[in-house]
Image (cartoon, grey):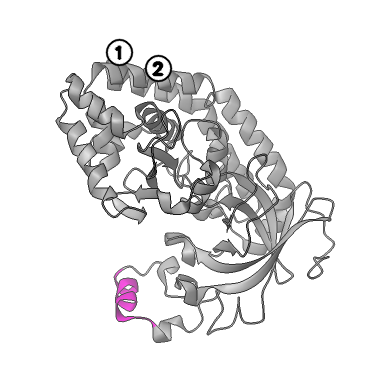
Amino acid sequence: MRIHTVPEVGHGVLPVLSLVAPDGAFFDPDSGLLVVGHTMLNAPLELERSYARDPRFWKYPGNFHGRGKDWERRAVLQCLGADGGEEWQVKAGVRINGQMTRGFPQHALRVLLDEPLQAAPWGEGSAGATSFVIRAAGNDQVKAMMRDAYQHGLCDGLLFEVSKAMPCVLYMNGAYWGVHHLRQRMDDEELARRYNVKAKKITIVEDLGVLYKGDPKAPDQLLGLVDSVEQWDGRAQEVWQHIEAQLDVPEFLQYMAVQLVLGNMDWPRQNVKYWRYEGKPIVGTKLDGRWHMIMGDSDLGFGAVAPPGGDMFQKLRPKDSPTARLFMGLMRSPDMLAQFKVIVEDLVSGPLSSSRLTTTLDHMTGTMAPEMERHTARWRKPVDAAHWQREVQVMREFAVQRPGAVRAQVQEFTGQ
């Protein structure tokens, strides 16, 4: 049963999400999530001063900056397949999601389900989600509309955790809202779902060593590990055993190599998450009690703000984040340095080779292209479909040139 009529307009192979909420939930000046509204009239003094110090358009205090339960609205979300038939329907709470992009034209939406989703929008093994994000590509919504989803897709199947994506078209109370990506929300609940454990047993630490979820002692413990690695001479076996007992080193090195290849310029001071299981360790699994990695937001990677020859090692050499310190400390070991070089070569010869980068890009572009004229006419961001195609070409050139550039940079970095 449809919850309302979606206009009979074809969207190619893209599924349609139809989000319906009571009057006022989206556009009312006092209660609407998607409008500037009356927030500035009642804004906390610090929020007013923050905008005065940095008056960029997306920082103007609007209702979309509201957080927490007070800014959650009830809604029904329906997914229609490309043939127009209903695939699933859920009741949920909806909030604005994100940080700096809250003030962008298209707002990301966090959807908190009343019941776990029985459908599997992201393929086999993805059923049971308790929340997800309907995202309009973050910073990339004004460019290629796909960079983050595309890069996470490239890394699906590697050692660390990624957020799968389903490109779709969104309608809000019957109004066309353009291209979005239905994304897995990478939090303690999603990790608990993936590994069939309780969410309270999951700890997540992010960015500069800030607790996201779980054990309050965890940030200090992670930073203590970073200190140990920095003080390691690269050879002392007892220190190495201490490191290996707390960190999945091969996974960490692969994660670092991927970020360097993909050129994530909004990293590593942010968009980093470490996680671990706090229950009884299960050796040989991700539930071994060691730190593991979650791939973060990558919308400023893959040529968004830097050319194919950009040297990502320059972001690590200052050692101004725990992740940079950890990596540079490990690289003091000749064995780790050699292992990292092999990992990079395996990536640029395989899952991140030019051929796979371009083939995957062509597939995603082909899925979205039929919709982009209608999307850009709605938002003018990108300006039009031709501008979108030019930004896709930037990504294509990055895909062709980046592996060779990384090989040269790794050779210089390792001195081999």
Magenta-span inclusion, residue 46: yes
Coordinates of residue 405 in the picture (x, y in percent): 42, 24
Magenta-drawn stretch contains 94: no
For residue 391, say whether it is visible.
yes
Q: Main secondary structure of the magenta part?
A: helix
Image height of 236 relative to 140, above or below = above
Q: Which residues are magenta?
A: 43-53
The residue at which mark 2 appears reads as 342
For the residue marked with disc 2, what is the amino acid?
Answer: Val
Depth order, front residue of 412/117: 117
Residue at position x 39%, y 40% in the image: 280
Q: Residue furthest top?
A: 416
Q: Position of residue 29 (x, y in %)?
A: 55, 84
> Disc 1 marks which amino acid?
Gln
Q: Position of residue 228 (x, y in %)?
A: 18, 34
In the figure, 54 relative to 27: above or below?
Answer: above
The numbered mark, 1 or 2, whose residue comes first in the sequence reads 2
Quarter of the figure that contains the C terminus: top left
373 relative position to 85: left or right: left
Callout 1: helix, strand or loop? loop
Please give left or right for residue 346 compared with residue 385 in the image: left
Q: Which mark is residue 416?
A: 1
